[in-house]
Amino acid sequence: MNETETVSAAPAAMSPSIPEEVMRDAVSTVLAVRLPGGESHVPDFTVSGPQSTRLESVGVDSLLIAEIIVELEERLETLLELRSGTRLETFAELHCALTLASPS
Amino acid sequence: MTPGLGHVRPTTLWEAGRVIGWDEAARQAERFREQVAAAQPSAVAAAVSTGQALVTVLIAARGMGSNVVITGPTVSDTRLAALGVDTIVEWADPSGNCTVRRLTGAEKLSVSAEPGLWLLSSGTTGEPKPTHWPWRSLVHGKWGRGSEHWAIGYAPHSFAGVSATCQALGRAATLEFVRPAELAAPKPDAAPLTVAAATPSFWRLAAIATRDPAEFRRVDTVTIGGEPTDASLLRLLSSTVAPRRIKQIFGTTELGTVIHVDDGQAGLPEELRGRRLPSGAAFDVRGGQLCISVAPDAPFVDTGDQVRIDEGRVHVVGRAGVFVNVGGLKANPYRVAQVLQQHESVLAARAYGLRNPLLGQVVAADVVLRRDRDPLLLVPELKRYSAGLLDAHERPQRIRSVESLAVAESGKVQL
């Protein structure tokens, strides 16, 4: 199993609008497909809280973030928006930055 | 013996369960001519949505000695008026009479002295563009009698549809305008088809509809054009249709049908690049695009088809200007679809852009799987499989298993 790196982060200013277990399942699904080794080699990661895993430490780049969003949209059957003016460093920041898209 | 080469007899048209003989087709053409003459148009367009309507227009227009614009359902009145059309002939009911409608605001049409047809490109990368085709380049010999049995699956308003129909009217005793599932289903007492002509998307849809290859209509020559053809399609056709010959057509609405290849391999032979073929035509690859010269004294014209050279073959892999913008990087949806179609479990695929709040767009794909395959297992496998063959930004981030693929009015798969 790969060792993962975690980082302390300040509590998010906004509470996530996506259930944590949905976020976790979506991330697991994407990592299982995209990282070498498949399902049995999905690294440990923490979605929320101060111990949230750094995206970079588990190989999550912008394309994988985009794919996690696609996976979440499929599971939630709704479009999502990304509200963040800064670089996303951790799963917690990504989690908090994602909101349900408002109807246009 | 090549099927369909029996007695020469008047051509019969089949479409959607309706059969009409040549005399009736000629009567409908006469009614078309009378209605157009009564309208006294400056320029007339015929909106053909069925093969039988196309035949009516072809017979009528050939006898009128003037020009007719052939149009399909996606071309707007505004676009037609900009081309100079002030009269549209339409069919509300495929089996009924045509009606005439006037357009206002028509601009002056650039006059072509030679009678023929104006055909519009499919508009994959923008507005459909008109090209004038004189009758002498479309038609050879008389129409209405033949010994062969043809099936045409091209959209009737497309260049390929018009060109194939013009050929069939000079050679066929029976001409069927077909949908994909009609070739996949058994047709009692149907003679083997001499020629069946359609787009790669049509052939994939026909294969999807096949329950048992033994039930597929027997075909001597399959012709394919209008979209990129790859090795996976040729394998699929060989296993499902098993024709004697598969003919790949290369050309455009503007240049016509210029080159055909029937050596059983996908793409054009690289060794022939830059050399004149017996027809006088030649092809070359310049700047990654397929360029074609139609005759020894004609310049090489960029077809807009993007190509890749691989193992001695020149493969068309997409259209210039058709891409998915993934965070500023261009992904070719045709290439993604081709890679997915190379997987043994995939019968057909289409790739397209999916809105994404981070990158603007990402690549998504719909796939039709072989009947015994489990989508829950295969979708993750297809993602891993395509990741090994595509650049990172081209990898489909969503793959859906679907029953069939969306096909545009042009008969080409929707991007």
Image (cartoon, rainbow, N blue to C red):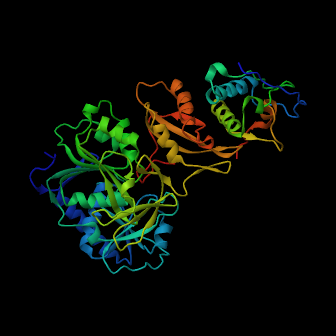
Q: Position of residue B354 (x, y in %)?
A: 61, 44
Q: Is residue B70 above or below residue B396?
A: below
Q: Is residue B393 above or below residue B42?
A: above
State which quarter of the image contains the N terminus of chain B: top left
Q: Residue at x 38, y 53 (%)?
A: B268
Q: Residue at x 38, y 60 (%)?
A: B251
Q: Is residue B113 above or below residue A101?
A: below
Along the line of sight, the residue nearer the viewer: B404 or B48: B404
Q: Residue at x 29, y 30 (%)?
A: B212
Tell me if A82 is positioned left or right of B222 in this view: right
Along the line of sight, the residue nearer the viewer: B181 or B103: B181
Tell me if B4 is positioned left or right of B389 in this view: left
Does residue A55 appear in this view? no
Q: Position of residue B2 (x, y in %)?
A: 16, 47
Residue B299, quarter of picture: bottom left
Query: What is the total number of numbered labels drawn onto the structure image?
Result: 0
Along the line of sight, the residue nearer the viewer: B337 or B103: B337
